[in-house]
Image (cartoon, rainbow, N blue to C red):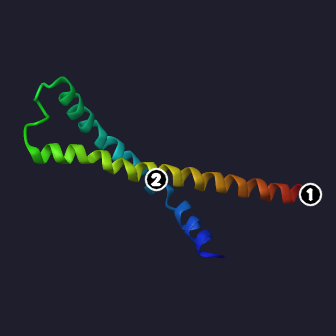
């Protein structure tokens, strides 16, 4: 088994952890959306209160990159697993 297949076998065993990571990242988006709406409405209730808070809430957008990559990897792993099952069934049926 090559390194590529070892990696995907390892990753497939960690999919639940990946889904939990994605959920956490998505939950972090809630305060970010409120902050962003406050900026758009220029209410100043959450946004522009303190520059450090603004920096953290703006930085949440960068965390989404992890979520996007993770979702792509989960989809790839599930498609790979489904294809492997179809191949096994095709071999058995012949």
Displayed quadrant of residue 29: top left
For the residue labelled by badge 2, is the local secondary structure a helix, a strand or a loop? Answer: helix
- Dot 2 corresponds to which residue? 69
User: Do residues under tags 1 and 2 come within 8 Å of each other at their CB atoms?
Assistant: no
Quadrant where the N terminus sits is bottom right
The image shows residue 43 at horizontal and vertical percentages of: 12, 25
Q: Is residue 83 above or below residue 39?
A: below
Residue shown at 44%/56% (left/top)? 17
What is the number of the mark on residue 51? none
Q: Residues within 10 Å of mark 2 (few under 14, many from 20)?
A: few
Query: Residue 41 or 11: which is nearer the viewer?
Result: 41
The image shows residue 82 at horizontal and vertical percentages of: 69, 52
Residue shown at 10%/36% (left/top)? 48
Quadrant where the C terminus sits is bottom right
Q: Nearer the viewer, mark 1 or mark 2?
A: 2
The image shows residue 24 at horizontal and vertical percentages of: 34, 47
Q: In screen coordinates, is 17 left or right of 72?
A: left
Q: Is residue 27 above or below residue 3?
A: above
For the residue labelled by badge 1, is the local secondary structure a helix, a strand or a loop? Answer: loop
Residue shown at 59%/70% (left/top)? 4
Rounded to the nearest angstrom, the CA distance separating label 1 from label 2 is 38 Å
Ranked by sequence position, the earlier of labels 1 and 2 is 2
Query: Residue 44 or 14: which is nearer the viewer?
Result: 44
Q: Residues within 10 Å of mark 1 (few under 14, many from 20)?
A: few
The image shows residue 26 at horizontal and vertical percentages of: 36, 42
Q: Residue furthest right?
A: 94
Residue shown at 11%/48% (left/top)? 52
- Dot 1 corresponds to which residue? 94
């Amino acid at each position: 088994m090559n390194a590529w297949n070892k990696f995907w076998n390892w990753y497939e065993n960690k999919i639940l952890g990946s889904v939990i990571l994605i959920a956490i990242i998505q939950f972090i988006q809630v305060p970010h959306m409120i902050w962003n709406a406050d900026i758009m409405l220029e209410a100043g209730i959450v946004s522009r209160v303190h520059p450090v808070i603004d920096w953290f809430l703006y930085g949440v957008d960068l965390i989404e990159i992890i979520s996007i990559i993770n979702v792509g990897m989960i989809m790839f792993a599930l498609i790979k697993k489904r294809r492997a099952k179809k191949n096994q069934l095709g071999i058995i049926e012949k």
